[in-house]
Image (cartoon, grey):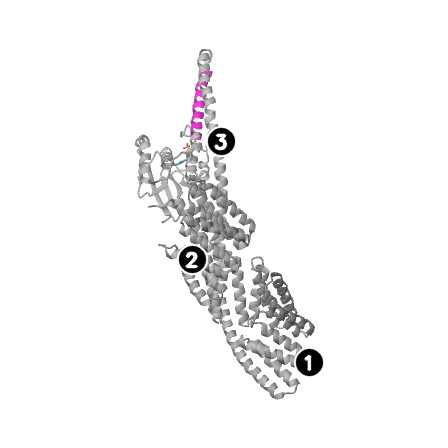
Amino acid sequence: MKLNPVYAMLQRARQKLLERNMDEAHIWLMKTLDAAQKSSDSLLQAKVQHLWAQSLLVKARYASDFALCDVCLEKLTTAEKLIGDQTASDFRIEILITRAYVFMAKKENDLAYSIFQEAEKWSEDYELINQNILSQCAISQYLINQNNYQLALVYVEEAEQKLDAIYPQSNELIAEILYQKTQIFLKTQEYVLMEEKAKLLLEICIAERDVEKELFAINSLSIVKSLKGDYREAMEFLLEVQEKSRQIGHRLMTANALINIGTIFAHLFNYQDALNRYLTIINDYKDVLEPNNQVIVLNNIGNIYFNTANYDDALISFLEANKSAEALNYKEMVAHTHTQLSKTYLAKDMLNESLVHAEQASFYLQDMGDVNGKQINWLNQAQAHFKLADLESAIHLAHKGLKLSQKVSDNVTLMRGYKLMSEIYEQSKDYEKAFKYESLYSATQNRFTIEQKQRQAIDLEIKYAIREKQQQIELLTKENEFQSQLIEKSDQISKQNNQLVQANEELQQFAYVVSHDLKEPLRMIGSYSQLLMQKFENSLDEKSKPYSNYVSEGVSRMNNLLDALLQYATIGKEEEEKELIDIEGIIDDVNFNLKLLIRETDAKIEFENLPSIRCLPSRMIHLFQNLIGNAIKFRNTDVPLVIKISASENENEHIFKVEDNGIGIENEHLDRIFVIFQRLHTRKQYEGTGIGLAICQKIVQGMGGRIWVESELGKGSTFWFTVIKDMRDELDF
Ligand code: ADP
């Protein structure tokens, strides 16, 4: 069965949206909207509105644009109104789910949740399994956002069981479930499970060209790689996410990729590149960044400044991070930033400030068990006490710090601790212990240096890979720019087209009214002047007698002109459907219509291999009849008349050619002849109204084509015209 073309267009718009090719999606959406509005299928119109809302929602989410969310809601309401009292429960539930997602984008989470629940209940009552699965996944998404991962998992697993029971399964639903599971396992740090789901998700998204979820899967896999110390591969994944998310305008995703990229660079001791990424996030992506991540980024920036001995800037960043963490009640980071502040003040020899922050850190850390970071706080305190000459406390605290450093494999703090211990014992003149710690310090430092060298080598490798990637990106960007220029142009053209259509409609109406309404008074002039002439016939002198003829000739000419004008005005008003027509058949019809003229003039009409195209048959006949009629009218009486008709095509259009060996046209008049009422001859030489070619032009333009002429005076003329190929014949479903 051949699919309704409008549904096929809708499907294409949906696919482009899934690919996050927003420009093309928009173009197809507008085409579909236009076509749907012309049909009386209100369910179809509703589906277009729904897709429109979905596409706006994507844009709104990417830009955190709440106003755009409201526009989405309006479209959804329109869709609901269009469904009216048709049943379509499945579609109604889909609209409901989209509506709730819009509220989620507006951060009205509770409202979103209650609508999701409504959708779940409704779909269950109506036994609409697909919609039921969709709504359960939506609830899972809500729960993930609320950090309730356990309950989210319960919902997804229930949805998965339902999906297992149906056949065939839609890839969309499988992907949705995998997407939820990957998110959950990422948050609960169950990396083995997460990797498994992310790989499956990636596979299915590539097949379905679901770009947003694909990027999410790649991002998740990069985290696994990075945790395994496979920085190079992790980086390759992240660069891909960064580039593609930029292309589709998903700024939050770009920001997250940048965070991960920065962190890898920092791990590889490439502080400059790490700092660049972090600063880009703070400067350009602050609006989309999740608040918690903002704290992390600020803290990471502080770390880099600290590691490059820029203590003043480190202080600024740590203070800001600390303030934000407190505002968010993000306890881990409050503790952590206090620790870092304490460490930085120590480096600046500001012992009091250092101890104040250390105390704060201890306060938050006391309930947290042996978490990474606590060891730094112990050592900060140890170092401060050492500087205050309280050696006993210093040793006690340093011991604690060393133990935890070993446990969490924090080599940097371990070295710091050994060094401190050796200094303390040196001061208390216990040289044996001092020596022991000094040796531990240098052994650890050796290991650390080797590791550092290895990581720096990886960094170099990555730099090389990035350079290659950068060149690829530059090439792609250029292509993209070119494409977006094209799209801009086509937008502009479609705007102009709309204006043109309107102007044309107005003109048509004007011409119709003029030609139609003028005929009545003209008829009166004709008949009354005739009556007058009859009445006064005998009192007229010889000179005045032909006046009567002049009047009736004028009236008849004006009548002809008005008829032609009416014909011109009514093109495009026929209620005819386009059909796939064999143009050779059209020429046969024209031959039949003009058969007397052709016989009289002994004209030869040759044609071969003319295509079949989708068009309105009556207009096509009109077009060819005018052109062939002109070729006969403007023939060269010295040579036998031959008219050749042929066609060719390119990717977008059919090109037709009507060639004669008639009197030809002077170069300077080539454009003028298509203008209404423009003629090159007197009526005495050649009968006519000067409207035929204007009609031809209008017909051709109506088919999205152009018409023009090439000619040599005395040798003949060739009229060319094009017809845009009909999409329905080009689409392959
Ligand atoms: P009409 O034929 O009524 O004059 P048209 O709009 O069809 O009006 O043509 C406009 C003018 O173009 C004609 O008057 C004629 O001068 C010129 N023309 C059209 N077709 C031909 C042709 N095949 N060869 C030479 N001149 C032509």
Residue 60 in sight from this viewpoint: no
Please state which amino acid type lies under the numbered disc 3: Phe
Q: Which of the 4 quarters of the picture holds residue 172?
A: bottom left
The crowd level at tag 2 (other Cα within 10 Å; few <14, some 14-19, many 20+) is some
List x then y, in percent, for residue 127.
40, 49
Q: Assess whether mark 1 and mark 3 are in contact (beta carbons under 8 angstroms).
A: no
Q: Report helix, strand or loop for mark 3.
A: helix
Can you give x and y, in whole percent of width and height, for residue 350 in the image?
A: 69, 73
Q: Residue at x 40, y 59 (%)?
A: 204
In primary-sequence order, the first of circles 2 and 1 is 2
Majority secondary structure in the magenta region: helix
Query: Residue 29, position in %: x, y?
Result: 46, 47
Label annotation for residue 158: 2
Q: Is residue 406 visible?
A: yes
Check mark 1 vs ligand 1: CB closer than 8 Å? yes or no: no
Element carrying mark 2: helix
What amino acid is found at the position of numbered circle 1 in the picture? Ala
Residue underneath mark 3: 510
Residue nearest the viewer, comparing 42 with 99: 99
Asked whether mark 2 lies closer than 8 Å to ligand 1, one says no
Q: Which stretch appears magenta?
A: 544-565
- Inspect the magenta stretch and tell me whether residue 290 lies in it: no
Residue 389's disc is 1
- The image quadrant that residue 596 belongs to is top left
488 up-or-down from 477: above or below: above
Residue most toward the top? 538
Front residue of 135 and 51:
135
Secondary-structure class at tag 1: loop
Residue that sits furthest to the bottom in the current view:
432
Indicate which label's residue lies in the foreground, 2 or 1.
2
- Give the numbered dot on residue 50: none
